[in-house]
Amino acid sequence: MIFLIYVVLLFLIFLGILDIEIISSSVDIYLQITSIILVILTISFLIIKKFDFFVNFSTLWFGLQRFIGLIICNFKFISVSVFKKFFLVKEVIFLYAFVLLLVHFIVRKLKKISFPLIFADKILIVYCLLLLLYTLFSSVNIWLKLLSLRRFITLPLLYFVGRIAIINFKEIKNCIKYTILFAYSICIYGLIDYFWARTYIYEYLFNIEEYFSKQVLVGFIPINWTFGDIMKSGVFTDYTFGTLPRFVTTFIEPTTLGSFLAFVFLFSVFCKKLINIKPLWIKYLLNLMLLFCLILTFSKGALTILLIGSAFILNYNKKIPKIIRKTYLYSVFVIIIGGIFIILTLNIGASAHINGLKTGILSAIKCPLGLGLGNAGNFANLVGNNVEDTVGGESAIGSMLGQLGFCGFIPYLLFIINLIISLVKKVNSNDKMIFITMAGAFLGYSINSLFTDSALGTTGNYYYFLFSGMLISQVILFNKKEALLNGRKHDEKEDAIYNTENFNSCK
């Protein structure tokens, strides 16, 4: 059903973004306007009434967007401007979702339906307000200012989209299940691409050079990505252990794909009740496939999320002997610290990530209020900005420390700590493992953001924030139900905001 909705919306979106001068000879302008209105109405309905469908639609969009972009860039009638609009659609949709849900939230407040905010919500609001304040007083050009704001604020806004959405626990579990099944499917395709069809797909069927050239023209990637043989660039080839191809599947980018697969793998392995696949050996085989594909991305960040997340989750599994849990936890710690030491000692390419964190910390110590939005990170030395030495490059947290200083970093850090504590400590449910897995995945993501700038990207990381927001709402709901069972005061009107009529069936 959702795939059919996706295909229809995709067609309507393309009809709406095509250049008018191209289509006016064959398609009436009113049809284009009608298609845009239909997209807005459909998306609005999904956001307000069928938010689980909207989440599944988003999963399809993020997972297939780049592959569809590869296909359409080979059509002569698709101009560079249309190509750019297509890749910005997801930004517009999620910004629209935030605004629409915020309006809906305000209406509920006017109707005296309370919406409790936890400390993580409040401190993240402070962080977002600080970002807007820094934007007003930033000295860089408007393009770089908006680019920096977008990179820091998009994921927090997605968290709030999840927080104020109307969705129940059963629907959340179905969304996670859908995401896992989608990951299985693109991994199967990706393995065919990896071992048998890569040359045919990217050189004969579709022109990968044209795809990357258009990405450069619209400013999405640096021009140096297109130097030389693209199939042997860092996107498709890893040189750590020789010349080895990287797993890209429909994402056509291994780093964001690795982050997505790490999220999916943790839920697929540790939340066994989500997907009931029989015989059991098939599920083990699928999980091994996920792990194999994740490793083939050669994404050190994905492995970091996997190791830290699994160590955190296993620490809460009382069925495993304590000595085994602690040994694994300490082993992960030693592996990560040892890996950092080796990287610094050998001074290999990955040392740039650690150096980015170091320069960000030193900059924040020197300037606690930060250098200003746009004056640190990978984009700081763009044309029109007078920055010579890049601070915080290749590190999301290093970039944050450089631009916002401790003033912006401390609220963000408090948000992370309180979010993880809230997911783990405040739920007594048969499905508690889902909350623990989310906490472990978010912890892994947060530590990974110390060492990689790609942690600020939306495509591979939106799952961590969107699902965290939705699950925090369920934490509050479970606590309300527990309070009701314990005979404490309970306001039944508050349940309406969570769409909890099927609560008992969700357990």
Image (cartoon, helix red, strand yellow):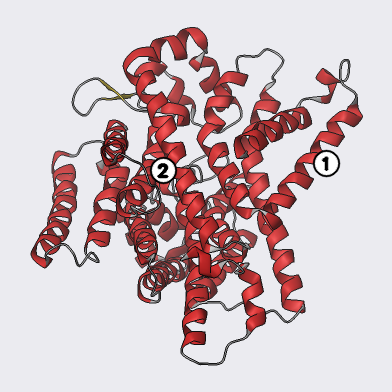
Q: Residue placed farthest to the front in the image?
A: 279
Residue tagged 2:
260
In terms of secondary structure, where does tag 2 sit?
A: helix
Residue type highlighted by circle 1: Ile
| Quarter holding residue 311 | bottom left
Classify residue 319 as left or right of residue 106. Answer: left
Q: Residue placed farthest to the bottom in the image?
A: 488
Residue 131 vs residue 267, the one in the foreground: 267
Classify residue 428 as left or right of residue 280. Answer: right
Distance of label 2 from label 1 (alpha carbons): 32 Å
**Percent of width and height locating residue 102:** 69, 64
Residue 191 vs residue 221, the one in the foreground: 191
**Percent of width and height locating residue 414:** 41, 72
Residue 314 vs residue 124, the one in the foreground: 314
Q: Residue at x 56, y 92 (%)?
A: 489
**Percent of width and height locating residue 104:** 73, 65
Residue 240 vs residue 459, the one in the foreground: 459
Q: Residue at x 41, y 18 (%)?
A: 230
In terms of secondary structure, where does tag 1 sit?
A: helix
Any part of residue 169 in sight: yes
Residue tagged 1:
37
Q: Which mark is residue 278?
A: none
Q: Residue at x 44, y 25 (%)?
A: 225
Any part of residue 378 in sight: no
**Percent of width and height locating residue 243:** 24, 20
Determine crowd level at label 1: few under 14, some 14-19, many 20+ residues with C-alpha closer than 10 A: some
Above or below residue 487? Residue 75 is above
Q: Residue at x 58, y 25 (%)?
A: 69
